[in-house]
Image (cartoon, helix red, strand yellow):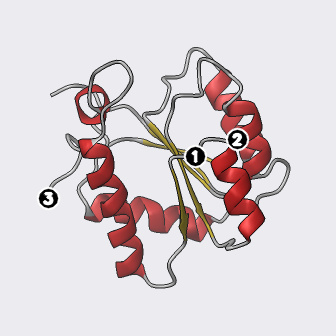
Amino acid sequence: MQKLKPILLVEDDLVDAMTFKRALGDLHIKNPVIHALNGEEALEYLQDESNELPCFIFLDLNMPRMNGIEFLQIEKADPRLKRIPVVVLTTSDNEKDVLDSFELSVAGYMLKPADYSTFVDAIRTVNLYWNMSKLPNGETEHEESGFPAQGAAD
């Protein structure tokens, strides 16, 4: 089995981060999770060329120091980083946040569900979608990274 690429979680709420990691575990997704508390920390990780680039980024919008939109503006302008799929996972249902996120080429925008089983279903749905997605280099995401497929069980 190939080494699984990390997933980058950009989330300032520690309870939400634990919930995310628990959901991956319950779905048998074994990719390592890199947790950044804000956009600034996420960019520091991504711009350090000694770090492995993640196969996927889950991004909160409302964070201190650098919010999700500010992060996206920099990440999507960087040729080395811009093709990494980003799904916004937030409590904000503000239409401007949705529009701004899609203007910055996010792969999806999901509201954080209130209950855990719905949250797991949301992550499962992202997993299944990316399991079937074709990337520009001609490989499917699961062949390249493990997230979602090789790290996941059905």
Q: Amino acid at mark 3?
A: Asp
Q: Is residue 112 left or right of residue 27?
A: right
Relative to 24, residue 35 above or below: above
Instruction: Quote the CA–CA distance across marks 1 and 2.
Output: 8 Å
Badge 3 crowding class, 10 Å Cα cut-off, few under 14, some 14 to 19, many 20 or more, is few
Q: Amino acid at mark 2?
A: Leu
Q: Which residue is mark 3?
A: 154
**Which residue is located at x 37 percent, y 31 percent?**
5
Q: Quadrant of the N terminus?
A: top left
Relative to 67, residue 27 above or below: below
Q: Is residue 143 left or right of residue 45?
A: left
Q: Residue 136's quadrant in the figure?
A: top left
Q: In the image, residue 42 lies at what x, y percent? A: 67, 38
Q: Secondary structure at mark 2?
A: helix
Looking at the rendered image, the disc whose residue lies closer to the viewer, 3 or 2, is: 2
Q: In the image, residue 48 lies at what x, y percent? A: 64, 20
Visible residue check, residue 130: yes
Looking at the rendered image, the disc whose residue lies closer to the viewer, 1 or 2, is: 1
Q: In the image, residue 79 lies at what x, y percent? A: 63, 18
Q: Amino acid at mark 1?
A: Val
Q: Quadrant of the C terminus?
A: bottom left
Visible residue check, residue 148: no
**Which residue is located at x 15 percent, y 54 percent?**
153
Instruction: Quote the CA–CA distance across marks 3 and 2.
Output: 31 Å
Q: Secondary structure at mark 3?
A: loop
Residue furthest out toward the right: 65
Q: Which residue is mark 2?
A: 72
Q: Are marks 1 and 2 in contact (CB under 8 Å)?
A: yes
**Which residue is located at x 69 percent, y 71 percent?**
92
Q: Residue 16's quadrant in the figure?
A: bottom right
Q: Which residue is mark 1?
A: 106
